[in-house]
Image (tube, grey):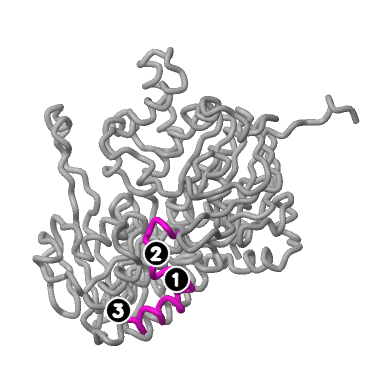
Amino acid sequence: MSDENVKTPLLRVRNLGLRHLSAFGPVTILTNVSFELDRGEILGIIGESGAGKSTLGNAVLGLLAPDFQQTAGTIEFDGKSIGAMTPGERDALRGRRISAIFQDHTSSLDPLMSVGMQVEETILAVDRSLPKLQARAHALELLARVGIPDPERRYGDYPHQFSGGQRQRIVIAIALAGSPDIIIADEPTSALDATVQKQILGLLRTLVDETDVSIILVTHDMGVVSEITDRVLVMRKGQVVEQDQTVAILDAPRNDYTRNLLAAVPRLRISAPAVNAGHGGGQDPSSQISDHRDMFLVVEDLSKTFSPPGLAWWLGQNSPKFALRDVSLQLQRGTITGIVGESGSGKTTLGRIVAGLDTGSTGRIIIGGSEYDVSKNGRRSGLLGRVQMIFQDPAMSLNPRMTIEETLRESVRFGAVSCHDGEHNDLVTMMDRLGLARNVLSRYPHQLSGGQKQRACIARALLARPQIIVADEPTSALDVSVQAEIVRLLKDTISEQDITMIFISHDLAVVQQLCDSLYIFRDGRVEDAGPCDAVFSQSRNPYTQTLISARPHRFTA
């Protein structure tokens, strides 16, 4: 075959080696990594936390910190070595021809700029000759395409006014704004519920088919890999252990490590619905939960309203917005209850009110027979200390100026249960149980991977020995093997310490594995409820069925 007939890949990485120049000496991060990416192709990169997936993506983007050093290999874009480019050429490449969707959506958005202006700014940065009205129209179109409801109204809102899943969708819109050749997407759907994830994956697939853009998808979610990728690269400890077509990897993996990853993926168990079973609509969903008199946590008719911002008030749009409307829950002591629903359905708002981090408008919360005033924050109402929260975004919930050991020691002392002499033993035991290396204790949050940060947050909550834990997407940043270990750990700890847990998640299979009962939220209300297996197998609620059908079919049993 002549050279003219050989198709040049859009991106080619050859024998790439990287090391990190740490204070304790050089540490090898990547070894002999090679792969190619064709135009119009989606390549999935999978592996456990710390495998080097995100570092590889940053190397392609040219965003490695100065203490990372390339020791071998080359990265070629469109037939030209990126290392041989001038600084101006690399700057023109990054953000225009190669764009990125980062895992941490919060730090990707400017808190002082409206989301519409951030999308519009990216469009104008690529084409400065574009009239501003056209740029705004294109920004509105992108926000609508990624599923932001009522983009005209939300255009001037700021990042903090959106849910975690909505912020991730905005980051995706910004990445698409420059019409790049390659998008490097680092866990782009980790904060999204099943229905929105399916929509985003469909959008990315459509963009690839229509525009011939290429995508490198860094993820730990095997369901995402099965739904969208053409080829898969499996990494472990900075090395490629296997790469092939997606179907081949999923159906006949050759490497034991790949087989173990696939075996750890939770399967949603669904049987045929009974003829007259489950919630059929029009009934009180809370009636599906067994009526126990010894409930430890009771939430009654909880509502939360937000007043419109000043501009909306002046325009006459002064109707309050309901984040929660007449929500009632009942939880037994020592049990785990799942809260499921689409982004913006009120799940996190409920958790924050129960944890005393936010206030409610009406309703009441009863814990162990004691009633708490929902109109007061936790410090004033007395909730503080009885409830701990594991936040969805671990990067934002850890103090960047404290080492992990300092953070965890503070949690042990706050719990006021363990004696001071036992602190270090408690820390070491918890680190071992969570699969964290003990040298993580001396590190700061920015030195940890996303999965490591989330495990540190889980350790902090457990070490405080609370009566109730509100876990908001605690496994969303974890790879499947660590996720399985964390689910077992949470189950054992809840049972041993007699803790009551609210587990907020968009992963139905994880909820089924972990939780005793389930509440499904929609638009600030309880849409469906009952024992987990009964809801998934017998519910006739259309919304529940929509959530179930949105899950990747390969991992539904």
Which residue corresponds to the image point at 54% horizontal and 58% vertical from the top-left?
Answer: 26
Q: CA distance from mark 3 to mark 1?
A: 38 Å
Q: CA distance from mark 3 to mark 2?
A: 38 Å
Residue occupied by mark 3: 332
Horizontal side of residue 35 vs 28, given as left or right: right
**Magenta part, dominant SS:** helix
- Residue 447 lies within the magenta run: yes
Which labelled disc corresponds to residue 439? 1
Q: The magenta stretch spans which residues?
A: 424-448
Which labelled disc corresponds to residue 443? 2
The picture quadrant where one finds residue 333 is bottom left
Q: Nearer the viewer, residue 384 or 206?
A: 384
The answer to whether marks 1 and 2 mark residues whose Cβ atoms lie closer than 8 Å is yes
Amino acid tagged 2: Arg
Q: Is residue 450 visible?
A: yes
Amino acid tagged 1: Asn
Q: Nearer the viewer, residue 195 or 2?
A: 2
